[in-house]
Amino acid sequence: MLTAPAAPAQRSSFIARHLARHLTRPRGAWVQREDAAMGTAIRVELWSEDNRQGEAAAAAVLAEMHRIDRAMSPHKIGSELSLINREAPRRAVPLSEEMALLIGRALEYAQLSEGAFDISYAAVGQLYDYRRHQRPDAAALAAARECVGWRQLEFDRARGTLRFARAGMRIDLGGFAKGHAVDCAAALLRRRGIAHAWVSAGGDSRVIGDRRGRPWSVAIRDPRREGEAVAVLPLEDVSISTSGDYERYFDAEGQRCHHIIDPATGVSPQGVRSVTILAEDGLAAEAWSKTVFVHGVERGMALIAAQRGVDAVVVDGDGRLHASAELLHAGG
């Protein structure tokens, strides 16, 4: 049955409502996703002009982090890292291209850090149980320390293989894998045209661009007062890594046993509570945060001063704040 055409006033009202819905519709939106991987919280926040594309990009970031976790977790029996730890004492293990890249970078930082950053610390690190407040006795610690030393990692860069020079050695990529994960996530987002984003995996983060007209605000946690900050940094296009003695720890005999181990001694350094590093990529930020923590304020800051494009904020064992010269200059 035919109906009579709408009156002009009715048509005008309908068109106005239709246009209003489209004209007021936002052209873009912030997308946030969170999950857990690599033993920590992972998070992405990004701006996209198209919500569906933004959601897809965020999902791809989380999927990428889970992929890296499956390959590099020391706790997953089927991971490439677990295979290396099982087989490398007996033979040269062929590495994936990605793993070979990480091992090569780790050994470069071991040398630059004068041994403070050493992925072979895991021979000692595996003896600590922070949930049960257990640490190795002197005999076990001495035996494990014999199996720590990055120079005993026989890495053939040309063949892409790794062999351990002695039985009992282990490696753990730890935060290095998290730094790699945020680097991979940032590259993935840039390929998808995302210009404003924050990606984090525990204490490792990457900010892309700014927060649409203003910088990202990154708070450095007070190591002894949860929920409070010792500094807030306005940042754009940079990687950040924070290592703290408050993440996994227990107190014993007046000292804090935490997850950051000095490869030379097999015990936790006591002169620093937290280190935050700003660098061009996540691998550098992670390696230098561990390095400064192990070396302490004076020696660690001297090493940072010699690096181009690397800055540090340190809370020492007495709660005092230290910052690299470039940061102090930038702050006026």
Image (cartoon, rainbow, N blue to C red):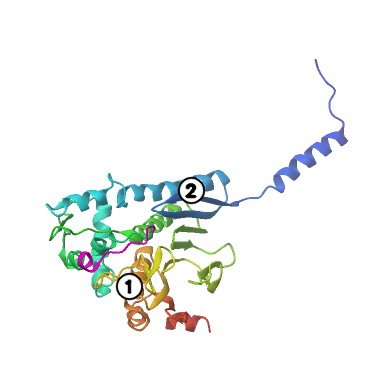
Q: Is residue 179 left or right of residue 115?
A: right
Mark 1: give few (<14), some (14-19) or many (20+) Cα within 10 Å.
many
Stretch of the chain drawn in magenta: 131-141
Q: Position of residue 154 (x, y in %)?
A: 15, 61
Q: Residue at x 28, y 72 (%)?
A: 116
Q: Position of residue 156 (x, y in %)?
A: 15, 59
Q: Is residue 36 left or right of residue 228?
A: left
Q: Residue at x 82, y 34 (%)?
A: 11
Front residue of this view, candidates 300 and 46? 300
- Residue that numbered label 2 is attached to: 57
> Distance of mark 1 from mark 2, alpha carbons?
33 Å
- In the rendered image, residue 137 lying in the magenta stretch gets the answer yes
Q: Position of residue 109 (x, y in %)?
A: 27, 69
- Residue that numbered label 1 is attached to: 291
Front residue of this view, candidates 50 and 314? 314
Residue located farthest toward the top when viewing the structure as drawn: 1
Mark 2: give few (<14), some (14-19) or many (20+) Cα within 10 Å.
many
Q: Disc number at residue 253?
A: none
